[in-house]
Image: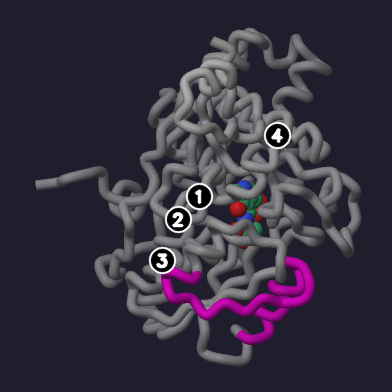
Amino acid sequence: MKFSYPGIIERYWDYLPVSDKTPIISLNEGSTPLIKSVYLSVKYGCELYFKFEGLNPTGSFKDRGMTLAISKAKEAGAKAVMCASTGNTSASAAAYARRGRMRCIVVIPDGKIALGKLAQAMMHGAEVLAIAGNFDDALDVVKYITSNYEIVLVNSINPFRIEGQKTGAFEICDWLGDAPDFLFIPVGNAGNITSYWKGFKEYKEKNISEALPKMMGWQAEGSAPIVRGRVIENPETIATAIRIGNPARWKEAEAAAKDSGGKIDMVSDEKIIQAYKIRALNEGIFCEPASAASVAGLIKEADENPEMLKGKQIVCILTGHGLKDPDIAIANSPEIISVKKDYDQIKKALNL
Ligand code: F0G
């Protein structure tokens, strides 16, 4: 008897580089909902859906790629895996590595990782190294160690990560019956936009879908190397998940935007926070700030170019759950009201 949907490896077995020798290390990831927008779709006259990847087992889209990367590492006999991370990759790697009985080492930028993500990596028993530097420095360290020791790199340079993450595109096509007109997605290390584009193309090549979406990738203004066309030495943004100055999949992301007729653009932190609140307050969906970059991008396009999106079918990828970063949520909300159990005081506080 099946108690829930199986994970992405079993669901998309024929589309993935797996065989009967592959041990499936899964937490039943994927099958995330495509939630219809009730506010922005009405405001901008489009058919908009949010793909809520924050509902994956460790709270982000990383689980799709990690189930495959860890399963393949196990198949190859690995005893240890390692990644650099702005937080979500480390949380996912730690959970799946532990399930696969492997050692997990993560390197994070000191002080720049959201609390929830750190708690996950620690709770799943990862060995956490906090480096004085940014994500790009952390990735250099991981590349060095994994090329000199028997430790498997599980960042999205690892091709199995891309293969797993492309299943997000399959799910969208399976649900909608075809690819949407536009896909809005945040861009950090650029693995996810690369994966989605690969997934959409594969479904079209196999005649499962007919259309291809325009890929609209969004970076934060202070961390927008692709948009600015140069490495950013000291990337900054409130959306720490995408605080990356030299994306590993830079060229692939550019190709996805160009070949699809889309683009890679940027939004300010102020607009990211605005979108973060709009989505929570008007759509009822709580995602971390990096996931708001794609929504901020959508709002920017719709305001600047209303005709482009009108009547179109659009999917916005919400990459990580809001609970990952409680500090930002609390800092951007009204203060709580402390009261005694005194009904006059309570009525006054509530304007009743
Ligand atoms: N959104 C979230 C919530 C992320 O954690 C990331 C990347 C992205 C978007 C960007 O995706 O890198 O594939 O372009 N987080 C990585 C990490 C870098 O270490 O967790 P990308």
* Label 1 – label 2 distance at C-alpha: 7 Å
Residue named by callout 3:
95
- The amino acid pointed to by label 2 is Asp
Q: Based on the displayed image, in which of its 4 quarters is residue 182 positioned?
A: top right
First in residue order: circle 3 vs circle 4: 3
**Disc 1 vs disc 2: Cβ atoms closer than 8 Å?**
yes
First in residue order: circle 2 vs circle 3: 2
Residue named by callout 4:
216
- The amino acid pointed to by label 4 is Met
Q: Residues within 10 Å of mark 4 (few under 14, many from 20)?
A: many
Question: Which quarter of the figure is the C terminus placed in?
Answer: top right
Q: Based on the displayed image, in which of its 4 quarters is residue 330 positioned?
A: top right
First in residue order: circle 1 vs circle 4: 1
Residue named by callout 2:
63
Residue 149, percent from left and from top? 57, 91
Q: Based on the displayed image, in which of its 4 quarters is residue 287 positioned?
A: top right
